[in-house]
């Protein structure tokens, strides 16, 4: 298949693009490089041993989308493009609605116009809001505790409505949990702009000396050590899940929903200890107030993906941290520190 990957130069999109190429698919990447680096595309091509078509631009740019769909006979879309930080979304909600909701609307409108009938949407476990219990199943009630999660939920509902109106569409909603890890080569990994919004890249930057200490947002949750518990899934498992879902479901009409997670939760302090074990020294941290919109526990029941798609996460927290540390220690300045 020829797959348009929006946000394909970003952390998850880059690994998914590599997995697509490895599986024999053709990849076209659209990315505005706001939260990604052009250098990452060179690393992708090095690892894949082939070139990819790249368009620098925004999913809100309908004229550009028309050009992409006209230039390439696209069979399916993997939609990663969007803003993704929970805390930031509470401070900049209008920007999140514009990029995430308006961008998705523009993309899907172009797909319908150009008769592209399959989309795999990068959704999130945040659509479950503050779940009544864990682990979380796909049939749990949906809600949101922050603008980021609400934008994901709005896009999911929009895609359901579009699929009802256009029955030839195949819509795959992948609700994944907390990505971490990097490619085994150390050539590609997570390279956030500015201060990382997510736990694992922040700890990695503390370990490499770019940050003084980790801020732990709250230690008074109803969890074993008081810190927030999340389901951390290796980005390579996540990428494999996207490709499997695409290959299995691109001809299956309707809406298909799957959790992508490991089925196990780790607290902030447990992840920190895993890092300390890999780097061989203690890492500084301090406890600060909770972030608006955060919840205490969130981890997946991934049984549906295992039963229906034959997919399950294979990599644990130890391997994830080792891969992150390999990437970060070899590339302390991320892609900006690499030369072609």
Image (cartoon, grey):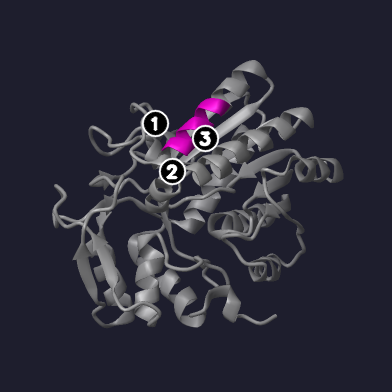
The quarter in which the N terminus is drawn is top right
Q: Secondary structure at mark 1?
A: loop
Q: Position of residue 108 (x, y in %)?
A: 67, 33
Disc 2/disc 1 C-alpha distance (Å): 19 Å
Name the residue at 55% across, 24% down.
160
Q: Residue at x 44, y 70 (%)?
A: 323
Residue 257, position in %: x, y? 48, 31
Badge 1: residue crowd in 10 Å (few <14, some 14–19, many ≥20) = some
Q: Mark 2 = which residue?
A: 148
First in sequence, mark 3 or 2: give its number: 2
* Image: magenta residue range: 150-158
As displayed, is residue 254 above or below residue 74? above
Report if residue 198 lies within the magenta region: no
Q: The C terminus appears in which quarter of the rendering? A: bottom right
Q: Are marks 3 and 2 in contact (CB under 8 Å)?
A: no
Marks counted in the figure total: 3
Q: Is residue 310 above or below residue 160?
A: below
Q: Nearer the viewer, mark 2 or mark 1?
A: 2
**Location of mark 3 (residue):** 173
Mark 3 surroundings: few (<14), some (14-19) or many (≥20) residues within 10 A: many
Q: Which residue is mark 1?
A: 138
State whether residue 95 appears in this view.
yes
Q: Residue at x 58, y 58 (%)?
A: 10
Query: Residue lying farthest right?
Result: 71
């Amino acid at each position: 298949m020829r797959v348009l990957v929006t946000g394909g130069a970003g952390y998850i999109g880059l690994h998914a693009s590599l997995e697509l190429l490895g599986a024999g698919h053709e990849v076209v990447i659209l990315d505005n490089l706001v939260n990604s680096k052009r250098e990452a595309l060179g690393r992708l091509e090095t690892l894949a041993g082939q070139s990819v078509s790249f368009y620098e631009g925004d999913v809100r740019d309908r004229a550009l989308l028309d050009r992409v769909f006209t230039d390439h006979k696209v069979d399916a879309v993997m939609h990663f493009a969007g803003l993704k930080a929970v805390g930031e979304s509470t401070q900049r909600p209008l920007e999140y609605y514009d990029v995430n909701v308006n961008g998705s609307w523009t993309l899907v409108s172009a797909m319908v116009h150009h008769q592209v009938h399959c989309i795999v949407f990068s959704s999130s476990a945040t659509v479950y809001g503050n779940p009544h219990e864990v682990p979380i199943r796909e049939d749990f009630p949906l809600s949101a505790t922050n603008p980021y999660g609400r934008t994901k939920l709005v896009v999911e509902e929009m895609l359901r409505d579009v699929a009802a109106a256009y029955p030839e569409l195949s819509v795959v909603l992948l609700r994944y949990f907390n990505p971490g890890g990097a490619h085994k080569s150390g050539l590609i990994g997570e390279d956030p702009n500015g201060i990382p919004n997510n736990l694992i890249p922040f700890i990695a930057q503390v370990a490499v000396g770019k940050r003084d200490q980790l801020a732990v947002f709250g230690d008074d949750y109803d969890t074993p050590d008081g810190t927030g518990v999340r389901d951390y899934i290796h980005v390579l498992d996540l990428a494999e899940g996207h490709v499997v879902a695409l290959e299995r479901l691109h001809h299956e009409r309707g809406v298909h929903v799957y959790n992508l997670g490991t089925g196990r939760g780790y607290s902030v302090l447990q992840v920190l200890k895993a890092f300390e074990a890999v780097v061989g020294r203690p890492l500084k941290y301090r406890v600060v107030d909770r972030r608006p919109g955060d919840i205490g526990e969130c981890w997946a029941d991934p049984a549906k993906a295992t039963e229906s798609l034959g997919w399950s996460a294979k990599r644990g927290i130890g391997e994830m941290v080792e891969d992150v540390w390999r990437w970060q220690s070899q590339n302390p300045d991320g892609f900006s520190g690499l030369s072609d």
